Amino acid sequence: MDFSAVLSDSVTYAREAFIGKWLRWAIFIIFALPASLIQFVINPKTILTETGGINWSAIPWVQIAILCLAGLLLSFFLTGYIVRIYRGVKPAPDFTEWMTLFVDGIKLDIVWFIWLLPVIVITILAAALFAVTIFSGQAGGHNVFLLLLVPILLLVGLVLIIIAVLFGILGVIRFARTNSILEGISFSQILKQIRTIGWANYIISLIIFAVAVVIYCIIVMVIALIPYIGWVIVLVVNPFYMIFMARYFTLVYEQGEQHQVPPAPVE
């Protein structure tokens, strides 16, 4: 796999998706705005007490709920747009057929939720065991045994996270290509795709992307520290990252399609 070509194509694709496409850029920013505004409705000075506790009644639950709900609903349009990129559309598509975008966004999130569901279950179970053991107020071998289970469950959860990431990334693209949630969670088919790409190529592509994400996160954290306008700049920059990520893994996925041997013609 030519990793430099994949990176170059992804950067170019993301740049061309927004340069001169100001309406498309504005849609990304506006739809991500509710989630960014949550930080402004929470005032630490009124929420934190003098003793360091939390004044729960001072938290603006209604405003937070409204912003979270608005952010969630609008996010489905953005993830639906990402689905179109996963389908290999080039150049980057426009925002059209809004209901289809919305539904595709929900389906993509469902695919990710299914892949992460075992991790969620294990994490909740570990937290519940820890809470029961700590707050039971009783000492004994039974509680010690339960406490020993917690790190084991967390280790299992870590393994499941790795599996979810490895298979979920290609799973959502497979869903986009087939328009089938079941295909998006088909372990055997995704495993076949990874083998076609090559485990080494796939792992290296993930490492390269992880490095790019770390660099991006550092830049974003520095930008966010700029008084008053830092959060606005982050809102403006984030769409580039979203499109870059979608295009990058689309190209990785297509490496598996390119190397598949076509079926022999029927005589």
Image (cartoon, rainbow, N blue to C red):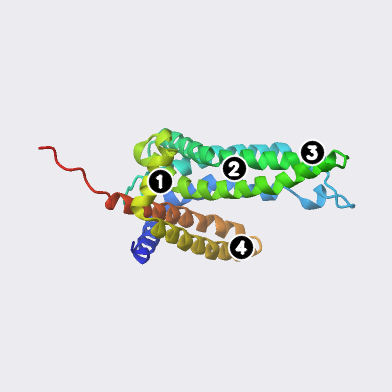
Outermost residue to the front:
141
Q: What is the three-letter code of the residue carrying label 3?
A: Val
How crowded is the residue under tag 1: few (<14 C-alpha within 10 Å), some, or many (20+)? Answer: some
Which residue: 40% across, 56% down?
Answer: 199
Mark identifier at residue 191: 1
Q: CB atoms at circles 3 and 4 under 8 Å apart? A: no
* Label 3 sits on residue: 132
Separation (CA) of disc 3 from disc 4 = 37 Å
Mark identifier at residue 119: 2
How crowded is the residue under tag 4: few (<14 C-alpha within 10 Å), some, or many (20+)? Answer: few
Q: CB atoms at circles 1 and 2 under 8 Å apart? A: no
Image quarter hosting the N terminus: bottom left
Q: What is the three-letter code of the residue carrying label 4?
A: Met
* Residue 64 visible here: no
Q: Nearer the viewer, mark 4 or mark 2?
A: 2
Q: Nearer the viewer, mark 1 or mark 4?
A: 1
Separation (CA) of disc 1 from disc 3 = 38 Å
* Label 4 sits on residue: 221
Question: Looking at the image, is mark 3 or mark 4 earlier in the sequence?
Answer: 3
